[in-house]
Amino acid sequence: MYKPIVTKTMSQYGVTGQYQAIMGKVQPIPFAGKFPAPSIEDYTVQKSLDGLFLTLGAQKKQIRQNPAARTTDLLKQVFGQKG
């Protein structure tokens, strides 16, 4: 779902080309060619999702601990506050 967007954006900004150029220089190094080159797109998607869920977790903790953080009517309804 996210990978096509990441792939397109990275290609637009030349990230993929730069990564491929670096990997082209790494491959001739002895033993480096024995390991598959990691996908820069997969890595970027995974780290982006890690960051997203880390941020969501922090926000969830704040909402649960701090009634003032429950700013929307929906959050107030979920946590039983009168809005």
Image (cartoon, grey):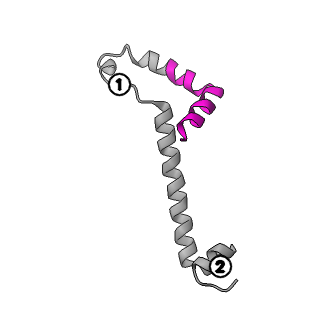
Mark 1 sits on what residue?
36
Element class at badge 2: helix
The amino acid on which the numbered mark 1 sits, given as a three-letter code, is Pro
Asked whether 82 falls inside the magenta stretch, the response is: no
Mark 2 sits on what residue?
68
Q: Residues within 10 Å of mark 2 (few under 14, many from 20)?
A: few
Whether 52 is drawn above or below 69: the answer is above
Residue at x 58% of width, y 77% of height: 78
Whether 48 is drawn above or below 70: the answer is above
Residue at x 53% of width, y 37% of height: 3
Q: In the current view of this chain or complex, which residue is farthest to the top?
A: 28
Element class at badge 1: loop
Residue 49 badge? none
- Can residue 64 be seen here? The reply is yes
Residue at x 52% of width, y 51% of height: 51
Quarter of the image where one finds residue 81: bottom right
Residue at x 35% of width, y 16% of height: 29
Q: Where does residue 57 sit, x and y in percent of width and height?
A: 50, 63
Q: CA distance from mark 1 to mark 2?
A: 50 Å
Q: Where does residue 43 sit, x and y in percent of width and height?
A: 46, 37
Query: Magenta-highlighted stretch: main secondary structure?
Result: helix
- Can residue 71 be seen here? The reply is no
Q: Where does residue 72 sit, x and y in percent of width and height?
A: 68, 73
